[in-house]
Amino acid sequence: MSEYLDCLELETGPDPVGAVIWMHGLGADANDFEPIVPMLELARPLRFVFPNAPIRPVTINGGARMRAWYDIDPRAPLAGAADIRTSAAQVGELIRREEARGIAARRITLAGFSQGGVIALHLGLRHPDRLAGILALSTYLHDHERLTEEVSFASVDVPIFMAHGRLDPMIPITRAITGREVLLGHNYRVEWHEYAMGHQVCPEEIRDIGNWLDRVYAS
C-alpha cells in the first residue's frame, strides 16, 4: 500500500523496547485511548501507535459517515468481512513500519476496543510472524467458524488478553465468551477478564492491562 493510516504516536520513555498498535472503536478516533497510557504505569518504555480508521458509511447508523474499521449491517452479521480484511492489511503496513524502525514483530502488540478489537484479533491470529500479544477489549471474534482455515501457525502461542463488561449493551458478553471458547478450544493462551461495566473501560481494567503488558515485555 502506498500510504499509511493517519496515526497518533506516544512513547512512554526513550528507546522503547516494543510497540503497541491500538485501534479505536466505531465513531471514535486516534485520540480515544491516548489518555490512558500514563495510567498503565508501565515498567518499560513502549511506543503506542493509535491509527485513525477510514471514514465510511455505516449501515447500522443509518448510513452516516464516520470513522469505522468496517461496515456493520445488523441484517447480515458477516457483511463486513471485506472491510475487515482491508483494514487488517492497512494495520499490517503499520507493523512493517515498526519493523523498519527497529522493533521486531515479536515486540509488537495489537490492541483494539470494540471494532478495533475485531481487527486486532483478525490480524493477530493471521499474521505470518509471531507477535508480542493481542489485546482485545469489549469485542468479539468475527466469523469464528472459519478461523482454522486462515490462522497462522506462528500465532499459536501468542498471549491474548480479552476483557469485557458484564453489562455491555452494545456487544453482549456472551458473544465475547463464544470467541474466548473458540480460541481456548484451539489451544490459544487467553487471559480473560470481566468487569461490572458497560461498553467502556474501567480503572481496574486499565490496571490489569498495564500488568499484562509488563509481563509481555518483561524480557
Image (cartoon, rainbow, N blue to C red):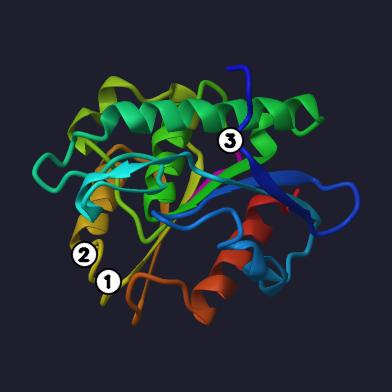
The residue sitting at the right extreme is 14
The residue sitting at the left extreme is 75
Residues at marks 3 and 2, CA–CA distance in whole angstroms: 28 Å
| Figure check: 191 above or below 72 | below
For mark 3, what is the residue? 131
The secondary element bearing badge 1 is classed as loop
Q: Which mark is residue 172?
A: 2
For mark 1, what is the residue? 168
**In the rendered structure, which amino acid carries the disc numbered 2?**
Pro
Q: Nearer the viewer, residue 65 or 115?
A: 65
Task: Report if residue 133 lies within the magenta region.
Answer: yes
Residues at marks 2 and 1, CA–CA distance in whole angstroms: 6 Å
**Upstream in sequence: badge 1 or badge 3:** 3
**In the rendered structure, which amino acid carries the disc numbered 3?**
Leu
| Quadrant in which the N terminus is drawn | top right
The secondary element bearing badge 3 is classed as loop
**In the rendered structure, which amino acid carries the disc numbered 1?**
Asp
The secondary element bearing badge 2 is classed as loop
Image quadrant assignment for residue 162: bottom left
Q: Which residue is at a point 76% across and 48% down the rendered structure image?
A: 219
Q: How many marks?
A: 3
In the image, which residues are magenta? 131-135
* Front of the two marks 1 and 3: 1
Q: Which residue is at a point 52% across and 21% down the rendered structure image?
A: 128
Q: Position of residue 152 (x, y in %)?
A: 43, 23
Task: Report if residue 145 lies within the magenta region.
Answer: no
Q: Position of residue 204 (x, y in %)?
A: 51, 79
Residue 156 visible at all: no
In the image, 174: left or right of 58?
left
In the image, 202: left or right of 22?
left
